[in-house]
Image (spheres, helix red, strand yellow):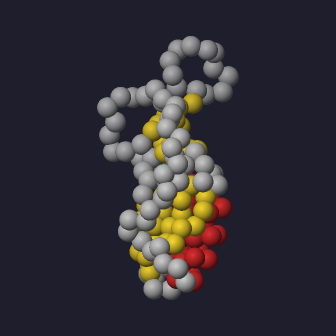
Amino acid sequence: MLAPKRSKYKTIFIRKSLSNKAKSPILNFGSQGIFSKEMGRISSKQIEATRKFLRRNLKKQAKIWINIFPSKMITKKPQEVRMGKGKGYVKYWAYFIKKNEILFEVKGLNQLVIKKSLISSKYKLPVKSGLLTKYKN
């Protein structure tokens, strides 16, 4: 699972993202990619599940780039614990997605297979996402 190797503090305060600016998504590495259509939070398990799904479908036909990394820790107190006594333990690591941010990029020879696998991998993500293509077919 994806998580930072070290963090400066045991727990952190998560600040709300105020920037809701919709930049147009641009592919940097691959020829096709998945971008988010709304703001949200994606956990490291969801990133890993999407990566595994793409790797299984594409095998060695394509190169995959993951443009996001879970850097914020999400804490949770155990059930039936009284209020107070600190913040709680780290439950999982997450990444806060902005609108129109590219999540995954893929480059390969067979564009049709890549497109089908990207469309089916969108359902592994917790936010609405779209498909982006560099070349027009």
Count of picture labels = 0
Residue 99 drawn at (x, y percent): 54, 49
Residue found 58% across the figure and 44% down from its top: 40
Quadrant (top left, top right, bottom left, bottom right) of the C terminus: bottom right
Residue 75 drawn at (x, y percent): 53, 32
Q: Please tell me which residue lies in front, 79 or 14.
A: 14
Q: In which quarter of the image is residue 30?
A: bottom left
Q: In this view, does 111 lie above or below 28?
A: below
Position of residue 7 in the picture relative to residue 91 (left or right): left
Q: In this view, does 14 lie above or below 20?
A: above
Residue 120 drawn at (x, y percent): 64, 70
Residue found 44% across the figure and 81% down from its top: 108
Q: In this view, does 76 lie above or below 87?
A: below
Residue found 57% across the figure and 76% down from its top: 115
* Residue 39 shows in this picture: yes
Q: Quadrant of residue 35?
A: bottom right
Residue 88 drawn at (x, y percent): 52, 25
* Residue 52 shows in this picture: no
Position of residue 1 in the picture relative to residue 4 (left or right): right
Residue found 35% across the figure and 28% down from its top: 9
